[in-house]
Image: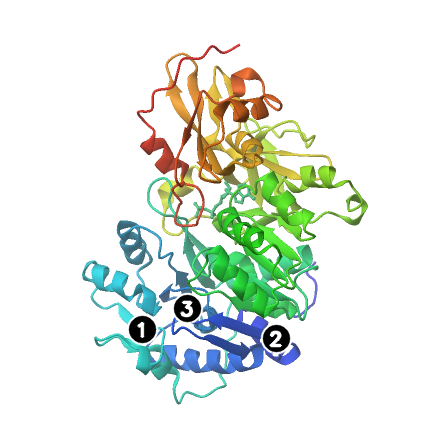
Amino acid sequence: MLGSMMNVPLNIADVLKYAADVHPTGEIVSVRTEGDIHRTTYKDTLGRVSQLAHALTAQGVRVGDRIATLAWNGYRHFELYYAISGIGAVCHTINPRLSAEQMSYIISHAEDTMLFVDTTFVPIVAALRAQWPAGLKIVVMTDRAHMPGGDDLCYEELLDGQATTFDWPVLDENTASGLCYTSGTTGNPKGTLYSHRSTVLHAFMEAVSLPNVLQPGRRILPVVPLFHVNAWGLPYAAPLTGASLVFPGAALDGENLFRLMDTEQVYSAWGVPTVWLGLQGEIKKQGRLPQGLADVVIGGSAAPASMIRGFEAQGVNVCHAWGMTEMSPIGTTGNLPPHLEGLSLDDKLALKSKQGRRTCLVDLKIVDEDGKRLPHDGVAAGELYVRGPAITAGYYKNDDANAGAFDREGWFGTGDIATIDADGFLAITDRAKDLIKSGGEWISSIDLENVVMAHPGVANCAVIALPHPKWDERPLMIVVPAGESRPEVSELMTLLSEHFAKWQLPDDVVFVGELPLTATGKVSKLTLRTQFAHHVLPDMEQD
Ligand code: ADP
């Protein structure tokens, strides 16, 4: 028997319409490419999004067309999110840090018909457009006064004179709304095609998981980019809950972020660990926190325990989150439940170093090599599989990638190795491809990095596997010193010996000025493995 309730589809435009009605003064503050700060509200944004929807329609955009963006975090990019999806087209965000080859691959794979680009990225377009489809229309996201030469379209001119209301179509909730490609650390990038239903549900799931931050009046700064995994869902969850957004534009170094957070009284800031290394450096330099900062959300790669301690010791709540492009992206969040809030700082830190508990409507399981479920005892480690309504059911036009991505029950394989404890806390041990297999035993690169990062002389660190004739693979530790002088290798080894067996210790430590980053700001172990492929490890006995 079916229930007899209205079958009103979940549509993205309704999120912004709700925000304009109920949170009309909720703000969007943006550092613009034009060099100034721009302020608007959800109410006024709905007006401009309506103008943009008319403009897109006038350009001939139809339901299902893929419309690409190449842009920083700012109000115009936010407007594109809603206007493109709102008329039934697909907002395809492109990561400007991808290689030229990857960018051209995804533009032709997605068959984009229009590309909206910030002035910063006009040179990339100029260099590559000859390789792109001739019919691709380019719109520069600025006003006439700031337009570069050439005959590309001007964003503000497209909006000028358009009506500030729009008759939004009621779309089937499974209509595609957004497209995001993973950064393709192996092979070509793979596309996740989001729907209105998955996007709206994800916004609710996030709001339920992070009520301390997602509420009216809170000011949230997404350092995590709109050009990758929907800025972790914030463009939807913030207006839904009435939280304001502070978009940082292009300047993401510690000094600029500190200044913006300070002047805009940012309550919560979201980003990958490399960004917070920069901010923590600036906090140390200034001897104070940015005014109003009470919370950081860290995800994308493992947050080192020393980073969590640094924030928590200054009274800033750290929420360690885990997810992936294929999950919209949030899978787990790490705020502690009330009965664990009273723990000592050390016990709290041990829990917060884990990646948190599942978001509602995300199911997790860990399995062994035969696909058998492992217990949630915090000890058994296995490959993590996920299931839920905001998780991909298959990569966009990519049968090869889909062939191995799901198990027999239809769960998605994350490629991460994890434990889950009795309280439901997930701990990512490693990406399967980053684990080090030594003499038949596994060594976690994340665990080694975490311990060494606590040394005051270490700014950053990565551990990779190098092939070894006897042991299969052995760990090499690559360290960025914090100051002018390097920490003694013997000191690092002593520190590691307190936590690891002798056979788990790195065979060698090398020092470098900086670590290579992926297009999403994570340490690129793939690049490091290539860079150190010929590094000769000193011989070491395994006991
Ligand atoms: P890509 O970097 O390939 O574009 P994503 O940004 O979707 O892909 O990254 C997803 C992966 O990032 C996860 O599968 C996991 O390996 C890693 N990751 C994300 N958050 C965390 C975290 N908090 N701790 C450890 N690893 C994480």
Which kind of residue does numbered mark 1 sit on?
A: Val
Residue at the image position 44 percent from the left and 12 percent from the top: 540
Q: Relative to 341, does residue 203 appear above or below in the rendering?
A: below
Q: Residues within 10 Å of mark 1 (few under 14, many from 20)?
A: many
| Residue designated by label 3 | 89
- Looking at the rendered image, the quarter that the N terminus falls into is bottom right
Residue 262 percent across, percent down from the top left: 58, 65
| Residue designated by label 1 | 139
Residue 247 percent across, percent down from the top left: 50, 66
Kindly identify which numbered label has been placed on residue 365. Answer: none
Which kind of residue does numbered mark 3 sit on?
A: Ala
- Mark 3 residue element: loop
Please report contact status of discs 3 and 2: CB closer than 8 Å, yes or no: no
Residue 480 percent across, percent down from the top left: 44, 37
Q: Relative to 418, does residue 310 appear above or below in the rendering?
A: below
| Residue designated by label 2 | 26
Q: Relative to 368, does residue 227 appear above or below in the rendering?
A: below
Disc nearer the start of the sequence (1/3): 3
